[in-house]
Amino acid sequence: MALHKPYTDVPGTIIFDAEQSRKGYWLNQFCMSLMKAENRARFKADERAYLDEWAMTEEQKQAVLARDLNWCMRTGGNIYFLAKIGATDGLSFQQMAGSMTGMTEEEYRAMMLAGGRSAQGNRVVGEDGDAQAHRQPQGLSRLKEGN
Amino acid sequence: MARITASVYTSHVPAIGAALDLGRDQDDYWRPLFQGYEPSKQWMKDNKPDVIFLVYNDHATAFSLDMIPTFAIGTADSYTPADEGWGPRPVPTVVGHPELASHIAQSVIQQDFDLTIVNKMDVDHGLTVPLSLMCGQPGPGQGWPCPVIPFAVNVVQYPVPSGQRCFNLGRAIRNAVESFDEDLNVHIWGTGGMSHQLQGARAGLINKEWDLNFLDRLVDNPHGLAKMPHIDYVREAGSEGIELVMWLIARGAMSDIDSPAPVPRVAHRFYHVPASNTAVGHLILENQ
């Protein structure tokens, strides 16, 4: 019998379960290696060469090089592990989380100061909240570009 | 005998640690948050425990994907603050309480909860930020006020333990503490949580109404709250809001759960939005 997964219809959300964990094992283990200052220095010196030491897929390496955390997560990355890439880049957790929303850093920060993102319309895929696929990417920068 | 006299609940956001370590706690952004913990620091001075049993989650620090214990108890003499990628926090080494920790491990495992016993691990912001919030920043050469038993819960990789299991585990921990012969005043802390989502297009989710209701129910109806399924935490409080199940371990260890004791006294309650990506919730409960 297949496992019951009641968490697959939450918009903008990938729950890190055993399946994701298998997919992302080496990507996440690479992230763990960045807890050592010497590894951070080696990664920064030559990112591609350092990534090639790990049994990651080419797509996972590209996602890391692009610093596209949504892409990393689709390939099995977990945000607590991926945070170590951001830390290596000197980013705060807020900058990392904001980078996944399509908003500018200022827009995301302002949203949090105004009380954060509403759960209204963002509980189940198919509603009309700002985290739903048809309203992505979000943010004023997108509106200005006329997308 | 040892006894649990109080429980403390607090979020454990990494940016709070950074704000303290970089001396930004009086900035406009952070001042309201730290003001909310001023009564807590005074309460800690007035109610200093002999041991803190600190429930938290490891954020891919001591445990990688190589091993994922559901519940892990620290039985070591000491624990070093971890390098989570920004360098280690400049806070003291955490002194453990190996005798009480080993006793609790023995007792709780015999009550049918499988704990992983850990004799060596670094501790991340999940453990050190609550200590900073409650005790303030120790000066040079100072340590934390008392020994700490780290208790790590897996809320990172699913399957994660249910609220009910966490609640029942708290009851077993209370039994374990009360069967320790030495006369010790123990506090149990449940940390992490309140609404937050750190990932994807839904990042930044905050559900104040739900959080405040959780705080109410934690005090008045913990038995009912323990029945809430994971998916409700995820939909209502964000994917990382699941950390709140850890608060039920601390609540389950309070004296009113399995005896006719009155509901604990609320010594302090605080709620604030935002700290970085999250809501911050905080409660101090005293057994009556």
Image (tube, coloured by chain):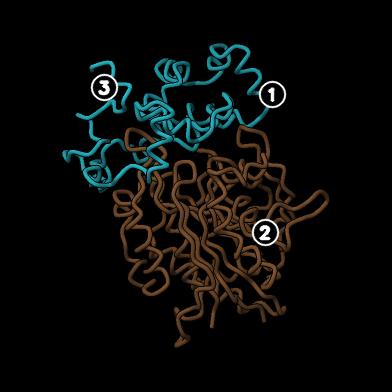
Chain colours: A cyan, B brown
The Cα atoms of the two marked residues, 1 and 2, are separated by 33 Å
Crowding near the residue tagged with mark 3, few <14, some 14–19, many ≥20 C-alpha atoms within 10 Å: few
Find the residue positioned furthest to the front.
Answer: B28
* Left or right of B93 in this view: B239: left
Percent across and percent down for residue A138 are: 29, 28
- Please state the chain letter of the residue tagged with numbered disc 1 in the rendered image: A
Give the residue number, with chain letter if any, for mark 2: B135
The Cα atoms of the two marked residues, 3 and 1, are separated by 42 Å
B272 in relation to A90, above or below: below
Give the residue number, with chain letter if any, for mark 1: A38
Percent across and percent down for residue B194 are: 42, 54
Q: Name the residue type under label 2.
A: Cys
Is the residue at mark 3 from the same chain as the one at mark 2? no
Splitting the image into 4 quarters, where does residue B145 fall? Answer: bottom right
Q: Which mark is residue B22?
A: none
Element assignment for label 3: helix
Is the residue at mark 1 from the same chain as the one at mark 2? no
A23 in relation to B12, above or below: above
Percent across and percent down for residue A67 are: 46, 21
Crowding near the residue tagged with mark 1, few <14, some 14–19, many ≥20 C-alpha atoms within 10 Å: few
Element assignment for label 2: helix
Is label 1 or label 2 in front?
Answer: 2
The Cα atoms of the two marked residues, 3 and 2, are separated by 46 Å
At a point 23% along the width and 41% down the height, the residue shown is A9
* Left or right of B14 in this view: B98: right
- Please state the chain letter of the residue tagged with numbered disc 2 in the rendered image: B
Q: Which mark is residue A143?
A: 3
| Quarter of the C terminus of chain A within the rendering | top left
Q: Name the residue type under label 1.
A: Glu
* Left or right of B39 in this view: B224: left
